[in-house]
Image (spheres, coloured by chain):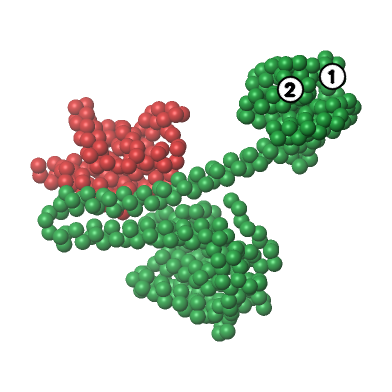
Chain colours: A green, B red
Amino acid sequence: MPEADRRLKVLIVDDEPGMRAGAERALEGFSVRLDEFGETVAFSVIPAATGGEALEAIRAAAPDLVLLDYKLPDMTGIDVLAAAPERPAFLTIMITAFASLDVAVAATKRGAFDFLAKPFTPEELRATVAKAARSVYLQRKAGALEEEKRQLRFNFVTVLAHELKAPLAAVEGYMHLMRERIKGPELAAYDQMIERSVVRIAGMRKLVMDLLDLTRLESGRKARAFEPVDLRRAASLAADAVAAAAEKGGVKVEVRAEPGLVLRADPGEVDMVLSNLLTNAVKYNRRGGSAALELTRTSPSSVLVRCSDTGIGMTPEEQAKLFGEFVRIKNEHTRAVDGSGLGLSILRRIARLYGGDVKVSSEYGKGTVFEVTLNDAAGGNSPAPEAPEGQHGRHHG
Amino acid sequence: MTNSEKIKVLVAEDDPDMLEQIKLYLEAEGYDIVTAAGQKEAEGLIKPGAFQAAVLDLMMENQDSGFVLSYRIKKMDPKVPVIIVTSVTRDTGHSFDKAQDPKSWIKADVIIHKELRFEQLKAALKRLLGAGEAHA
């Protein structure tokens, strides 16, 4: 007999002492190996002779399983189920006489999990209990997953709120300072405060926009329109979009793509990938540095997008944190850098929709290289994102 | 009050706008402000006599930047009042208070939770500096 990892409490409700004793004997020393959970479960039995005793035991002992006779001296098994508290949850196995289909239907409506028809053998009892034990485990596992999802969601919203609060506080603070005329009556004295407020508000707008993009991608609700996308053209458009920031930061931007490089994709998603890569390469750079976007065909249906910069680079610790939502690497070089912290989450999400992924290699103080692989999208226009060849299902989490 | 008599306050805050605003408010109160844009920069400024009080943001490069700085300042001179500003308890549900009295190990004199209110900060500084002078 293997050592039990856990004991489930089984409440046996029957007015016949022989039945209670028989069930107790049948479960004594009985254990079930649940291979999918890597655990062995044994059982401890709590007897009850009446509906009243059963309800008492459910409240006091919180059983995992209840073996419940339908005909009890003070009430029916259905009445017990109706009167029992909803939590903690237990599984019910109704014990009924032959041919009482009505009872079975009523009990199922009240949430009975299974039935045992009287008379039953110890083997039948064990088989039914083993099935119920597996179900108890499955339910608990599902509950734990649900809880984990709730926690993730809570964390996301918490960090999001924090990310919005910081710029709000900054703008609000400047408003108060201006109202107090802290720098005197001249409007020009407040130019810097106004400029900084505009910058922080733009940051909030970007965060909200990125959040919408990410939410649409995650939900799978965004209508995607696939068409052949000229990547050379898309890359030069993305480069144009960062030209002003690059000039301001003194960063040279280069685009290299062979002519006729076409990917079947949603043009908006391609632009999000290329723009995110270039924006990061320009932002996390230094005066006199450069950023290069190279696109090459690696197979008839796939493309490699490589974005390298001579920027500030990242330490291994910083790289490990990189793909977390709202993560912006904070060090003395990045103080002036703003962003939503969602760009790379978006990038990776899109890459995976195209059956690809994002790889990063970086050296602190030298620069960073991002490599994104994208495959042709399969099929026609799709209402919901589906990865090509179904290698990557929808992401839940 | 001449310039040399002004009380010097170290303000460490990694949000450039918050740093600027705290500086403006405290300067208007007559303090001389030494700014640090992060933990590392602030560490370089911790020297005897460099400042008479410190206002530190909790989360800068690290989650506990403010605590680390406070510890160093108090080790250098336990009489320098330290105010740590944080909204972390409200935002994350983390609690410093549950496990133990935070001040016993953080060694800060005041921890301002929630959103920073400048009035609150001014009052705390005034109170702590007043107490410091009484001891001296």
Which is more N-terminal, label 2 or label 1? 1
Q: Is residue B29 visible?
A: yes
Tell me how far mark 1 sits from mark 2, CA to CA: 17 Å
Callout 2 amino acid: Thr
Residue A328 place in picture, x, y as percent: 44, 55
State the SS at label 2. Answer: loop
Most foreground residue, B20 or A99: A99
Q: Chain of mark 1?
A: A
Between A46 and A82, the residue placed more toward the observer is: A82
Which residue reaches farthest front? A102
Is residue A193 placed above or below B68 in the rendered structure? below
Circle 1: is it few (<14), some (14-19), or many (20+) Cα within 10 Å? some
Instruction: Report whether residue B66 is seen.
Output: no
* Residue A216 left/right relative to A141: left
Q: Looking at the image, which is closer to me, A256 or B68?
A: A256
Work out whether residue A188 or residue A106 is closer to the camera in this orientation and state it. Answer: A106
- Where residue B55 appears, as percent x and y from the top left, is 29, 41
Please report the residue visible at 37 percent of the width from the left and 41 percent of the height from the top.
B87
| Residue B62 marker | none
The residue beneath circle 2 is A76
Q: Considering the image in quadrants, where does the C terminus of chain B appear?
A: top left
Q: Is residue A263 above or below residue B88?
A: below
Q: Position of residue A226 (x, y in %)?
A: 58, 73
Of all chains, the one bearing label 2 is A
Query: Which quadrant, please, contains the N terminus of chain B?
Result: top left
Q: Amino acid at mark 1?
A: Met
Helix, strand or loop at label 1? It is helix
- Residue at which label 1 appears: A19
Identify which residue is drawn at 41% across, 65% down: A283
The structure residue drawn at horizontal position 31% and vertical position 54%, both measured from the top left corner, is B16
